[in-house]
Amino acid sequence: MDKELDYITEEKKKELTLELADLKGPKRKEIIEALEYAKSLGDLSENAEYHQAREDQGKIEARIQSIEQILQNSKVVIPAGGDVIEVGSKLVVRKEDSKEELKYVIVGYQEANITEGKISNRSPFGQALYGKKKGDSISFETPRGIVNYKIISVS
């Protein structure tokens, strides 16, 4: 697996596809109706409803474009479950000088969420982990200095 590619899970692909369908269907229709109503109010230069509807339309169109780009340029990753860390790998690590074990999943940057234990393959932590195996030690630099971890398990 190429760690420089953009990856998404099948779950994320489904989520984005549903969001795209909603934006292109009902949401676009709502904006068109809001624009029509605002135009019916008269003078557009001082029409707050019209300006708000145009702003909302811009945001929706930008999000549609963003989702289409993600879906077009991302590769859906199927976790292999091997012993080498790659996108889709689940792992347990322990920080040096600590007994606490932390569980993470390596994901593409679109899905990264540290509070859910999802680490981007492009983050310094994800890059340090990439290609390593159970028992390996890794180090990477953070704003607070170099941090060391030991890989306890990979699945």
Image (spheres, grey):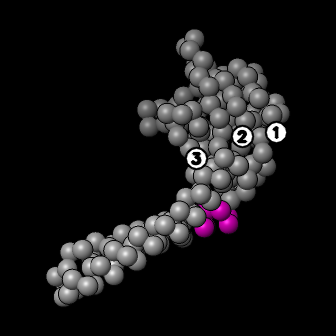
Residue 17 versus residue 122: which sits nearer the camera?
17
Q: Residue furthest left?
A: 46
Spatial separation of the CA atoms under disc 2 and disc 1: 7 Å
Please report the residue visible at 78 percent of the width from the left and 45 percent of the height from the top.
Answer: 78
Mark sitting earlier along the chain (3/1): 1
- Assess disc 2: are there few (<14), some (14-19) or many (≥20) residues with their C-alpha within 10 Å of its C-alpha: many
Mark sitting earlier along the chain (3/2): 2
Mark 1 element type? loop
What numbered label is drawn on residue 88? 2
Q: CB atoms at circles 2 and 1 under 8 Å apart?
A: yes
Position of residue 13 relative to residue 49, above or below, is above
In-image side of 54 versus 63 (left or right): left
Question: Could you tell me residue 68's position as x and y percent?
Answer: 60, 67
The residue tagged 3 is 111
Residue 54 versus residue 5: which sits nearer the camera?
54
Identify the magenta region.
67-73
Residue 49 appears in the rendering: yes
Mark sitting earlier along the chain (2/1): 1
The residue tagged 1 is 80
- Assess disc 3: are there few (<14), some (14-19) or many (≥20) residues with their C-alpha within 10 Å of its C-alpha: some
Q: State the quadrant of the C terminus.
A: top right
Position of residue 87 relative to residue 41, above or below, is above
Question: Is residue 70 magenta-colored?
Answer: yes
Please report the residue visible at 67 percent of the width from the left and 66 percent of the height from the top.
Answer: 72
